[in-house]
Amino acid sequence: METHRSEKDRVVLVPFTDFDPAKLAGYSPAVPLTIRSLAVFTASEVETLIYVGTGGGKLILLSLNPTLPSTSSDDSSNAPPIAPVQFLRSATVSNRVIESINVLPEIRRVIVLSDGFLFLVDTLLLQSIRKLGFAKDVTAISKRVLQPDSSISDPFGDGAVRAEFSRYGQTFLQKFGGGIRVNGTASRVSELQRGAGTGCFLAAATGKKLLLIELFLPSNVDLDAEHGSISIRWKEIQGIEGVKTMVWVGDSIIVGTSEGYILFSDVTGKGSLIFSLPESSPPLVRPLLRSSDVLLLFDKVGVVSNALGHPVGGSLIFQYVPESIAELHPYVIVARDGRLDLYRKKTGVYVQSLSLKKSSVGPCIVANDDQGTGDILVIGTTYKAFCCRKVSPEEQIKDLLRKKHFKEAVYLAEEFESEGEMTKEMLSFVHAQVGFLLLFELHFEEAVDHFLLSESMDPSEIFSFIMRDPNRWSQLAPRKRYWGLHPPPVPLEQVVDDGLQAIQRAMFLRKAGIVNATDEDFILNPPSRADLLKSAIENIIRYLLVCREKELLPPVKEGVDTLLIYLYRALNRVPDMERLASSENSCVVEELETLLDGSGHLRTLAFLYASKGMHSKALTIWRILAKNYSTGLWEDPIASVDYDSNSTSDLLSGQRVAAAEASKLLQESSDQVLVLEHLGWIADINQECAILVLTSEKRSKQLSPEEVIASIDPKKVEIHQRYLQWLIEDQGSEEMHLHTLYALSLARSAIELVERDSKLDNHLAERSNEMSASDVANKGALTYHVREKLQLFLQASDLYDPEVVLKVVEGSELWLEKAILYRKMGLEELVLEILALKLEDCEAAEQYCAEIGRQDAYMQLLDMYLNPKDGKNPMFKAAVRLLHNHGEFLDPLLLLEKLSHEMPLQVASGIVLRMLRARFHHHLQGQVVHNISRAISLDTQLARLEERSRNVQINDESVCDSCHSRLGTKLFAMYPDDSIVCYKCYRRLGESTSARGHNFKENPIFKPGWLVTR
């Protein structure tokens, strides 16, 4: 047998042996036997029975062992091979052609059609042949195909039924009764008589009738018993003449005649035309067992319909009108004139073609196991038969992959998986296998696409493409998993080099006229090594990034992240490399230290150290980078283009980034020695970062304030002050020396700023014409801010030493600060002197006198106004203001004594007049208050009198609001909220709380009196 197919044809059927039935059976060559019918039955995994029906009525039984090596009847070798096909026995059924053979495995029998009669034989031809006499002039026969997903009716439920029951050679007709009727009347074997067992149904076309037959074997009878143990029932329904082919599926019987196909119901017996046939088209119908559909031949077209005759799916278009059709799931096989063609049943795609040897050409018959479970196909010609084996799905895919038809192989695997012939795990395996083949074919993007579609592929399988074996992860990759279609893993550089060599070789062979399977695009446009290597690395990165999101074993996670750093470095993708190193990762530091250090990617190494908790090493690198940024150890990916004009700004930016990254590590570190070691250089670059390090609350154990303060550079005043402020305000420290240090630091800063502003004022005064508005506005902003902070702290804190602070500010112009300190020390006269005379803040001075709370304080303040020291003029306006606001606290006689003799009369008269008016005003105010108080007192007395003189009427129904007992003649009390209680409850409740729960002390009741309502 020869195979003819195009390069993309799949190998589905493989011939493995052929045989001559007559030669095997030992018949004389003088009387040739022609093959007219075939049947195949899979008895076991190692034995398949082949039934050959001849033109002379002989039935030959052969045994096929598919596991034996392939042989041929034409093999001339001298060694005696073990023939896979062996003759078992033969039997003579009739002297006419055996037209049809049907194996009935349910009852271990074979039904044979010959000379218009049906013959029943056992599967091994050991018993005598039994002729079914009730069936005559049979032209076609079919076994019933059941539909597992639908209910099947009993074909013998209605109509005339005849039965034949034989036991040990005896035959009798059932007597009347029991549901059976003889001679055309209703008859049926009762279920009690039939009992449990196995059986099958057949349909036969006889003349103008259809004969429905049931063969039943009771369960108490052995399957290998004689034919007489089989119960046979049959039923006739109206059919049609000229039936040449037929099938019985479910409740429908489809018959084919030269005029067309007709569908009959086995329940009602009614028939309907499906479609007609042209004169040139022979009828041929075959059941499709897996789907319970039917294939109807219409010329060169195979129409697939369901049991009701309705077309389903697409039709199969053949290249010729077939003589025989068989189903080998999921394919349909057609044969004619020694040629076999395979078509995909679901899609109608042409798959494979086989041609028989020319010496064997003739009418073809194809047969396989009617149960649809076997993988053996037998092709019969006039004198010879050939056996083919269906190639497994895996072998079919392998064949396509060897030919580099990768898309077709994947499509085929998906088809197998959708139809249940291949598991989902196997489909994942195929995707991985295709991915590796495409990888070596230099199609890296498509290879990774298939890797991602494979759920069973382990990321460790591609580690060897990145890092040469042996390496840390060499033992993780599973071994011997694939079909050996691709070379062992090698680094990507070698894959690219080998692929380019293969392309060069293919170009050379093409010039010599030899065509191979190398990619046409690569031959026409040869790629460069750099582009291929870049594509390979980028796609491997894409695969590893997807793998990072999956649940992987810890060693595999380490390999994925570590090799990602390798690949990022190869492409110089610094941002991606740093992003991975700074995030949560499973990188192995030992594998990357030397690599990153040698390539100058110190920042990535610092991020990696930090992510692994190796803060000391990370901080050392940040320190080196901050000091050596200009020497090239730092490669800023953002500012990749250098400009001379921006070199200084780039340097500062890089240093600030280094300080910021180092500060992030130190903010979480509780290692005091480490923090103080790196605090200095961070403060030199960015004081804000240093402050964040010292004031961080992320660390589990705070630093020692004494050690930190001692390590801070005295020149870094801002850091010193901010740290002390954080200790005092945020941490609530009550250490006196810390409060004193903070006050001293603020005081010194304020003194420096005041002196600086004074010098700046002198300088601006000399250049007043050039002074801008912004200079004037911003000149004292910082000074004001620092002094305000100092003043607030001096007022709020009571834990610093004011004498120590006063020694610092005593000789400065910080008068308000001095006043606050004198106040803390209790020196009232000095405070009033500063407020009244130095600052001339009358309101603050008066407020301070009010805080003191003594009248002599106002007199002392007035004396300061009228008799200032240091040669200042009297402050008459301030004195008048004091008299106006607080004249009631001043003694007029003492005031008059304090008035200076040098005071002008006009001013003095105004002071005296204002004082007298104030005294008279205060006198009148006192009278008003006195009279109002008397009125309120009188109103209260009247209201109390009215309450006490109220009359309360008590009757027989009156009860106590507390104990609810009748009052009668008892002594009782009444509260202002009108609640009444007996005397006993009054003594218990008291005067302040009523029986209703009202507490008059906490919530008194007010009632309008005569003064209000008048």
Image: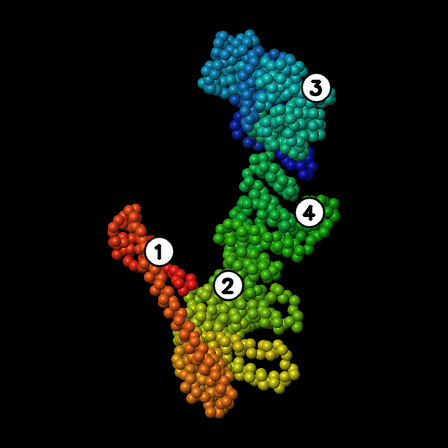
Name the secondary structure under disc 2.
helix
* Amino acid type of the residue that numbered disc 4 sits on in the rendered structure: Asp
Distance from disc 1 to disc 3, alpha carbons, whole Å, reads 115 Å
Tell me: 938 left or right of 294: left
On the image, the x and y values in percent for residue 1007 come to: 38, 60
Q: Circle 4 is placed at which residue position? A: 519
The residue singled out by tag 3 in the image is 259
The x, y position of residue 342, in whole percent, is 65, 31
Label 3 packing within 10 angstroms: few (<14), some (14-19), many (20+)? some
Q: Are marks 2 and 1 in contact (CB under 8 Å)?
A: no
Residue 977 badge? 1
Compared with 18, 674 (above or below) is: below
- Cα–Cα gap, marks 3 and 4: 53 Å
Dot 4 falls on a residue whose secondary structure is: loop
Asked if disc 1 and disc 3 are in contact, CB closer than 8 Å, the reply is no
Task: Between residue 26 and residue 292, name the one nearer to us.
Answer: 292
The relative height of residue 657 versus residue 347 in the rendered view (above or below) is below
Find the distance from the CA under tag 2 to the CA under tag 1: 80 Å
Q: Nearer the viewer, residue 211 or 665?
A: 665
State how far apart marks 2 and 4 are (Cα).
Answer: 46 Å
Disc 1, SS: loop
Q: Quadrant of residue 973?
A: bottom left
Query: Can you tell which of label 2 and label 1 is closer to the viewer?
Result: 1
Q: Amino acid type of disc 3?
A: Glu
Choose mark 2 or mark 4, whichever is in front: 2
Res 609 label: 2
Q: Earlier in the sequence, mark 3 or mark 4?
A: 3
